[in-house]
Image (tube, grey):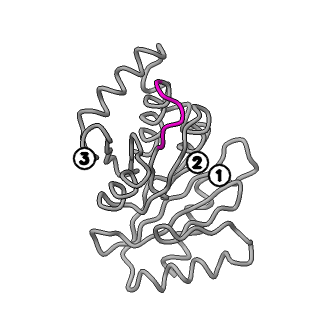
Amino acid sequence: GYYIVGLLAQAFLIKQSGEKIVHDPRLVWNTFDIVDEYKGVAVQSKSGHAFIKDVMREHNAVYGGEMSAHHYFRDFAYCDSGMIPWLLTIALLSETGQSLSTLVENMIAKFPCSGEINFKVADTQTTIQKIFDFYADQNPQIDRTDGVSLDFGTWRFNVRASNTEPLLRLNIESRADSQAQPMQYYVDELTGLIQS
């Protein structure tokens, strides 16, 4: 779902630059990159349909996407649709002359990510605080829109309690053009910390 959010943002912004695109904070760099390239405005929202829809209305956003593959559209009464994304994707493939796999592979190569990793923990807030404390001395940029996102410049992660299940959800991303460690390094480090 993550890379599709950027792809759908591109589909809208090709037609109308300056539009606002709402996204959740779990994985963001690909979305920022595309929205910036096509001269849109990225607006962050807490995950979940009620939050996304409220932020879309507040900012009159044309599109809102979640990494969980929920997609909301201003012209569809801010509702989620599975059909509209495919229609927009087909139109974008036609316009660009590229295959879907090529478009997505290019995004994955630029901004590799872990995919969402779920953990059962005794206390999500205590675990989130333990993670925050572990990385605090590295002076990351901190965002608390939904859980905690820590950005170290070359890599970042978001960790949050699920809105719908008794789980802790972790998402990690990096920049391929940076001196970041291989993705598995960060996955192993955070998994060890969460499970300790």
- Contact, CB < 8 Å: mark 1 with mark 3? no
Give the percent coordinates (x, y) of residue 171. 49, 59
Q: Secondary structure at mark 3?
A: strand
Which residue, given by chain and number where applicable, does mark 1 sit on? 182
- The disc at residue 79 is 3
User: Could you tell whether 186 is left or right of 163 in the image?
Assistant: right
Please say if 99 is above or below 60.
above
Question: Which mark is nearer the camera, 2 or 1?
Answer: 2
Q: Secondary structure at mark 1?
A: loop
Between the residue at mark 3 and the residue at mark 2, the CA separation in whole angstroms equals 25 Å
Please say if 145 is above or below 52.
below
Q: Residue at position x 40%, y 55% from top?
A: 58
Label 3 crowd (10 A; few <14 / some 14-19 / many >=20): some
Which one is earlier in the sequence, the residue at label 1 or at label 3? 3
Give the percent coordinates (x, y) of residue 79. 25, 46
Q: Front-most of 36 and 58?
A: 58
Instruction: Identify which amino acid the numbered label 2 is placed on.
Output: Trp
Instruction: Identify which amino acid the numbered label 3 is placed on.
Output: Cys
